[in-house]
């Protein structure tokens, strides 16, 4: 008889822990005959560390579940422009094609080191553009100043990034964790961490004065790398040159743009692709705009709290408020101008789409004209043959009945009738096409102008009668 080993207790371990999964796997029973060998169980110390980290950082379960992570933990690039600012930079966007450069365990550990609260981490969502923030207000009612501000900011359309920030209002220190998506379907060059570090160094003086402005510096960096005015202008000019409906075709050819393309299927696909790119770019720019407006509001709130806590530095705080507001306002203006440029590009693209449809309709119209001309050539002969085939005409009456002819000797009559009718039909069509339509348009315009003149003359007469009546009523009132 087979002996059974005692089963370990699983009710003492949380179900979401890796240890519970290992124990449950160990408790799986063999089949009915007990012949299935038990797989070896390997307890990994890292799994126990994950359990500890998740117990320390609740609220990240949903984000860790839906985001994609790297299997091998890469090191984060760090930058510290001053003792009050520390930035950790990674790569990736959490998508399947571009996972975060670190493991989920490493991410939980970094969030624990930064000191994010559980209620704030529950707001963080993966794979969506967002802007979430939370002031950590104290439980006691003795003070109304929150000790810290937590912010989560991300874009997900293109030029995507994911940023977490914790700002200490008392110490005026900022700790930032940011991930940059290196490439997407719109980028021509990768978005690297070294580029962001160089951008932060160029704004180091501003960040030393106020570390919270690192959010606006990040937004400015995304704008600098993403806004491509010349690219959209070149693509629109290229499509305009391929459609061949512009008067600047020679200058476009000299500029190196494509020649006229007659493949309407390819042109339609390129137009749809460019429309999708413009829509994604506009959505990304509008997201950056909303982020900048939210950052501007939070900066004002933080400056008010700091001014309350340090009344002796009110003048310095006022200077900082003005400086920060102007910096963020420049980011907002830059985003609005880029959105207007995107609106112009979309309007031009709609015009080019209408031009493409007109070219397709013109091609169909030309085909129908060809069919109509062929019908005009052969329809008179068909009409004449239909008349001659009736019993009205009998071209074989003079022929001997024992020697009938295959072709009647009056065949020239049919040929002459076909030639005359075809010529008359074609000449009539040409005259109508060249002069008849113009005459009809002039006749319509003359009738419209005459009707307008009659209406205007009647309205003038009505005005004169109204004025006369008013003058007569005023004279009568004066006499009374």
Image (cartoon, helix red, strand yellow):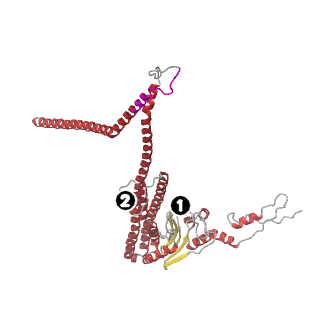
Q: Is residue 445 above or below residue 205?
A: above
Q: Residue at x 41, y 59 (%)?
A: 237
Crowding at mark 1 (Cα within 10 Å: few <14, some 14-19, many 20+): few
Mark seen at residue 128: 1
Q: Work out which quarter of the rendered image holds the C terminus and state it.
A: top left
| Front-lying residue, 27 or 76 | 76
In the rendered image, the quadrant that contains the N terminus is bottom right
* Residue 345 shows in the view: yes
Query: In the rendered structure, which disc, 2 or 1, sits on the residue that comes first in sequence?
Result: 1
Residue 280: give x, y in percent of width and height: 48, 59
Residue 139 visible in the shown view: no
Residue 435 disc label: none
Magenta residue span: 402-419
Q: Name the residue that disc number 2 marks.
A: 250
- 23 with respect to 238 (left or right): right
Q: Nearer the viewer, residue 181 or 117?
A: 181
Q: Position of residue 478 (x, y in %)?
A: 11, 37
The residues tagged by marks 2 and 1 sit, at their Cα atoms, a distance apart of: 45 Å
């Amino acid at each position: 008889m087979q002996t059974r080993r005692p089963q370990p207790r699983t009710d003492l371990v949380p179900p979401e822990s890796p240890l519970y999964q290992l124990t449950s796997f160990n408790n799986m029973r063999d089949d009915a005959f007990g012949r299935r060998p038990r797989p070896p169980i390997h307890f990994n110390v890292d799994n126990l560390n994950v359990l500890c980290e998740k117990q320390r950082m609740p609220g990240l379960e949903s984000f860790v579940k839906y985001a994609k992570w790297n299997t091998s933990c890469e090191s984060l690039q760090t930058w510290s422009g001053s003792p009050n600012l520390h930035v950790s930079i990674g790569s990736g966007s959490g998508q399947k094609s571009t996972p975060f450069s670190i493991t989920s365990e490493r991410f939980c550990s970094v969030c624990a080191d930064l000191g994010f609260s559980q209620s704030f981490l529950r707001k963080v969502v993966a794979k969506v553009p967002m802007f979430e923030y939370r002031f950590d207000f104290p439980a006691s009612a003795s003070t109304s100043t929150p000790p810290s501000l937590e912010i989560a900011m991300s874009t997900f359309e293109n030029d995507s990034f994911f940023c977490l920030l914790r700002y200490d209002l008392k110490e005026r220190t900022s700790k930032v964790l940011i991930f940059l998506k290196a490439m997407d379907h719109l980028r021509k060059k990768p978005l690297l961490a070294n580029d962001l570090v160089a951008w932060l160094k160029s704004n180091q003086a501003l960040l030393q004065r106020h570390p919270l402005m690192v959010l606006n510096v990040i937004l400015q960096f995304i704008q600098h790398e993403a806004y491509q005015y010349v690219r959209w202008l070149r693509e629109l000019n290229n499509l305009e040159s391929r459609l061949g409906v512009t008067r600047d075709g020679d200058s476009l050819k000299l500029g190196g743009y494509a020649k006229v393309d007659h493949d309407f299927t390819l042109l339609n696909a390129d137009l749809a692709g460019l429309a999708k790119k413009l829509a994604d770019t506009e959505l990304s720019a509008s997201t950056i705009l909303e982020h900048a407006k939210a950052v501007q509001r939070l900066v004002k709130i933080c400056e008010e709290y700091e001014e309350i806590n340090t009344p002796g530095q009110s003048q310095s705080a006022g200077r900082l408020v003005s400086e920060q507001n102007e910096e963020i306002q420049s980011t907002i203006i830059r985003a609005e101008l880029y959105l207007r440029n995107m609106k112009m590009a979309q309007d031009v693209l709609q015009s080019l789409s209408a031009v493409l449809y007109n070219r397709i309709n013109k091609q169909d119209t030309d085909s129908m004209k060809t069919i109509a001309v062929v019908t005009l050539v052969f329809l008179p002969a068909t009409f004449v043959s239909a008349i001659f085939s009736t019993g009205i005409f009998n071209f074989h009456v003079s022929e001997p009945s024992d020697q009938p002819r295959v072709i009647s000797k009056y065949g020239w009559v049919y040929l002459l009738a076909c030639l005359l009718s075809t010529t008359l039909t074609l000449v009539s069509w040409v005259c109508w096409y060249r002069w008849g339509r113009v005459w009809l348009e002039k006749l319509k315009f003359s009738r419209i102008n005459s009707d307008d003149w009659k209406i205007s003359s009647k309205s003038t007469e009505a005005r004169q009668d109204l004025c006369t009546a008013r003058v007569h009523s005023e004279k009568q009132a004066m006499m009374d």
